Image: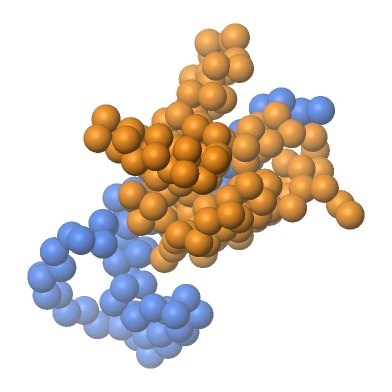
Chain colours: A blue, B orange
Amino acid sequence: MKPNKKIDKKFQMLFSEEELRTLKDEAAKRNISASEFIRMCIKNDLTEKTSYSRILALNTLASLNKK
Amino acid sequence: MKKYFLTKDILHELIYGDKLKKAKIVLKLEELLKKNESLFTSIISVNHILEKEIDLEKRKLILRNINLVCEKILSLDNEDLPLTLAMESEFDISHDIAVDLIIATKFGMDSVLDTTDKFRFQKMISVVSVILESK
């Protein structure tokens, strides 16, 4: 999701107490809102490159020419 | 989420540097990727890396993985050239440094990530130097 993408669709969902606490804690750790954190998770896991695949690619580059 | 611009020097050290230098760069970039920060580089830097490789398969592998690590590979337009040349002569810097700086500022990078302090002369953008030599 690009920062300038229009965000105007509303969606409600139910969470368990534990899920909601985890969501808020993880968002707070990143200094972003819970909504922004959910958008980030969707972006990472479904629509774009994941952190895991990027880190894997980084390590592949570093291991190409071993001295 | 911040935007970091990777210079050709940092890419070069990541791929061709010695073990210790690679490890320091990987550590720094992993830290940024885990925080979901966005990394960018320029087509000029990528070209500089690819020119060094003779093996076609290795070139493809490098390109594919740089493309994965970075959110986008950026480039300049023809209309950016006069400003780049002006900066080059005004600040008495190399063409490569001027190009990196123009690209980084044009695309709103928060920081330039480099292995040297060659960008320290300017006050336009923050610079994060990954120190590779132990002192």
Answer left or right for B38 relative to B78: right
Question: Is residue B70 visible to the viewer in this orientation of the structure?
Answer: no
Q: Nearer the viewer, residue A65 or B16?
A: B16
Q: Could you tell me residue A64's position as x and y percent?
A: 67, 27
Which residue sits at x=40%, y=45%? B102
Which residue sits at x=15%, y=68%? A7
Rendered-image quadrant of the N terminus of chain B:
bottom left
* B104 w.r.t. B16: above or below: below
Which residue sits at x=51%, y=46%? B91
Q: Nearer the viewer, residue B10 or B87?
A: B87
Rendered-image quadrant of the C terminus of chain B:
bottom right
Based on the displayed image, in which of its 4 quarters is residue B99 positioned?
Answer: top left
Q: Nearer the viewer, residue B98 or B73?
A: B98
Count of labels in the image: 0
Seen as rendered, the residue at the extreme bottom is A17
* B38 w.r.t. B66: above or below: below
Which residue sits at x=50%, y=61%? B123
Q: Could you tell me residue B16's position as x and y percent?
A: 70, 29
Question: Is residue B76 visible to the viewer in this orientation of the structure?
Answer: yes
* A19 w.r.t. B88: above or below: below
Answer left or right for A39 relative to A60: left
Seen as rendered, the residue at the extreme left is A9
Q: Could you tell me residue B32's position as x and y percent?
A: 55, 59
Seen as rendered, the residue at the extreme front is B90
* B102 w.r.t. B82: above or below: below
Answer left or right for B63 relative to A66: left
Q: Nearer the viewer, residue B90 or B21?
A: B90
